Amino acid sequence: MKINKNNYIIGVTGGIGAGKSTVLYILENSWGAKVYQADRVSRALIMPDGSAYEDVVALLGNDILTDDGLPDREAISKIVFRDPEKLSALEDIIHPAVKAFLLKKAKTRKGLLVFEAALPREGGFDELCDEIWYIRADAETRIQRLEDTRGYSREKSLEIISAQLGDEEFRSLCDVEIDNSGSLEELEIRIKDQIKRIKKKTGADI
């Protein structure tokens, strides 16, 4: 059942180097979408005024805090990297908090909304979306982008890519596949075609 008839929610997902950020930029700046990224939302929610702050500190201890009382992401990463149970417990705090935040936006915001997450079904992300886009690019393109933008070696890029979901796994979880292996102009055309399709399907002015 649709959460809010006055909006349309696109979920955006895909592997590292596929160009999700570019897609989000186009949707926001060319189509007026309100964009929410799960990772950024989670970072905000563990800040002192965030809904998950107290639970995270209770789980991981005051050692994760800086002198200013702010969560130290590096300290958190070190703890959960060596303790799978703590990682699972942390996810059990973060995922519901992120979903609650996005659900509130889904209920209250009008127009075109975009929710981005690395995994399409992480924390019930898919349940909030009207459709999910899988942004993909061929491996060589992704490797080159990671070398250019992050300075990763080819070996590191391949290691990260191989550890993530593959094309078929993403396709099985998503409704729309957008190839971002080419130029920016080609990507813009593909996104425009999808927006036109959504407008035709829904009759919405987005």
Image (cartoon, rainbow, N blue to C red):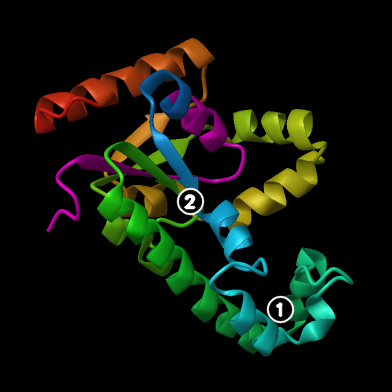
Task: Classify residue 177 by image quadrant.
Answer: top left
Question: Residue at the location (62% across, 49% down)?
Answer: 161
Question: Residue at the location (47% across, 36% down)?
Answer: 136
Name the quarter where the N terminus is drawn. bottom left
* Up-down relation of residue 65 to residue 196 (above or below): below
Task: Classify residue 59 by image quadrant.
Answer: bottom right
Frontmost residue, 155 versus 45: 45
Q: Nearer the viewer, mark 2 or mark 1?
A: 1
- The range drawn in magenta is 1-26
Residue linked to disc 1? 80
Frontmost residue, 191 versus 105: 105
Q: Position of residue 174 (x, y in %)?
A: 31, 48
Q: Residues within 10 Å of mark 1 (few under 14, many from 20)?
A: some
Cα–Cα gap, marks 2 and 1: 25 Å
* Up-down relation of residue 188 to residue 135 (above or below): above
Query: In this rendering, would 106 be left or right of 154?
Result: left
Question: Residue at the location (79% across, 84% down)?
Answer: 62
Q: Position of residue 86 (x, y in %)?
A: 65, 85
* Up-down relation of residue 200 to residue 86 (above or below): above
Is residue 42 rendered magenta in the image?
no
Q: Three-letter amino acid code at disc 1? A: Val
Task: Classify residue 124 by image quadrant.
Answer: bottom left
Mark drawn on residue 166? 2
Question: Residue at the location (76% across, 65% down)?
Answer: 73
Upstream in sequence: badge 2 or badge 1:
1
Query: In this rendering, would 123 be left or right of 41?
Result: left
Is residue 13 rendered magenta in the image?
yes
Frontmost residue, 166 versus 1: 1
Name the quarter where the C terminus is drawn. top left
